[in-house]
Image: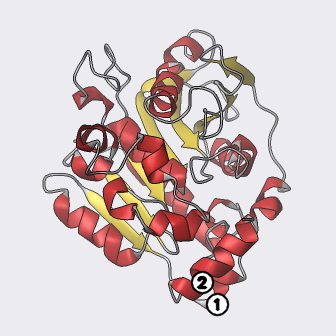
Amino acid sequence: MSHRLILATLAVALAAPAAAAQGISPEDVNRLPTRVPHAVHRYGPAPQQYGQLRLPEGAGPFPVAVVVHGGCWTKGFATLANTAPLASALAERGIASWNIEYRQLGEPGAGWPGTFQDWGMATDALRDLAKDHPIDLKRVVTVGHSAGAHAALWIATRPAQPDGTPLGAVDPLRVQGAVAVDGPGDLAAFVGRDSMVCGQPVISNLFGGTPAEVPERYAAGSPGQRLPIGVPQVLVASVVLLPEDAKAYAEKAAGDSVTVVALQDSGHFDMIAPGQPSAEKVIEAVQSLLAPR
């Protein structure tokens, strides 16, 4: 199923505003101008284990946004090209951007736990990048779109993942906050809706079973089951992440600072298309998490 058809289905099924169905397509986003990366760095041996670092003008050190694309966690929907315009816009605003690729369902090693491990290894790779580039490892946030919203929130849970478990890591890089752009934070609650959004079931494939079959995996891999996670979060809600679902997540996150930005007239891909009002809201959310507190 194409992205255009998925969005049209969403608009009908979720009674979303007409603007959501008529929004910018992912192909339109991919064609937007981007800045040439300052570095392309590999964080693992698989072809998909790499990222693009873009730096602002000046001497630095710069705060960093780890940028994670969406695509239903599945090969063939999207690559980091879909978030390259957003990554470029962040660099133009004084924020270094680390736009990462990762293994998706349909590729060797993807799913549980490989896709999650890719997100983690890519984030930790900032330590290697900091050896040669002026980035500030104490000012790192994540921002992810659609399926990447799940990744952005999950990366923030890594310090509390037990060592010796599939998603645990020794001394994971801590992030200062997470921006989840129109994607789910509670993966168990998204089972069923994933078929409507993606045209096929994906969550059970990502985790290797249903919440009833592998509850321990959802407990480790679903941010909604790991709350509070200890960092500020911004949830940008519209088409895939419904405002009521974002509010339910925020209510569950007792002790966390969770801001819900509800966009009523935004298409799913407008939010990562610089120049669109909703994309400006996303950039402002990233800036807010990096502001002095």
Q: Secondary structure at mark 2?
A: helix
The quarter in which the N terminus is drawn is: bottom right
| Residue located at (52% from left, 27% from top) | 118
> CB atoms at circles 2 and 1 under 8 Å apart?
yes
Furthest-front residue in view?
213
Q: Is residue 246 above or below residue 74?
A: below
**Numbered tag placed on residue 275 in the rendering:** none
Q: Distance of mark 2 from mark 1, alpha carbons?
A: 7 Å
Q: Is residue 132 above or below residue 71?
A: above
Q: Is residue 129 left or right of residue 21?
A: left
Q: Is residue 91 above or below residue 248?
A: above
Instruction: Out of 170 and 140, give the one closest to the viewer.
Output: 170
User: What residue does disc 2 label?
Assistant: 11
Q: Earlier in the sequence, mark 2 or mark 1?
A: 2
Rendered location of residue 108, percent (x, y): 63, 27
Furthest-left residue in view?
255
Q: Secondary structure at mark 1?
A: helix
Rendered location of residue 129, percent (x, y): 59, 16
For badge 1, the amino acid type reads Ala
Rendered location of residue 168, percent (x, y): 31, 22
For badge 2, the amino acid type reads Ala
| Residue located at (50% from left, 77% from top) | 263
Rendered location of residue 247, percent (x, y): 28, 71
Q: Is residue 182 above or below residue 5?
A: above
Local packing at callout 1 (Cα closer than 10 Å; few below 14, some 14-19, many 20+) is some
Determine which quarter of the picture holds residue 278. bottom right
Q: Is residue 287 left or right of residue 268?
A: left
**Numbered tag placed on residue 18 in the rendering:** 1
Q: Is residue 157 left or right of residue 107?
A: left
Q: Is residue 145 visible?
A: no
| Residue located at (65% from left, 86% from top) | 19
Q: Is residue 61 visible?
A: yes
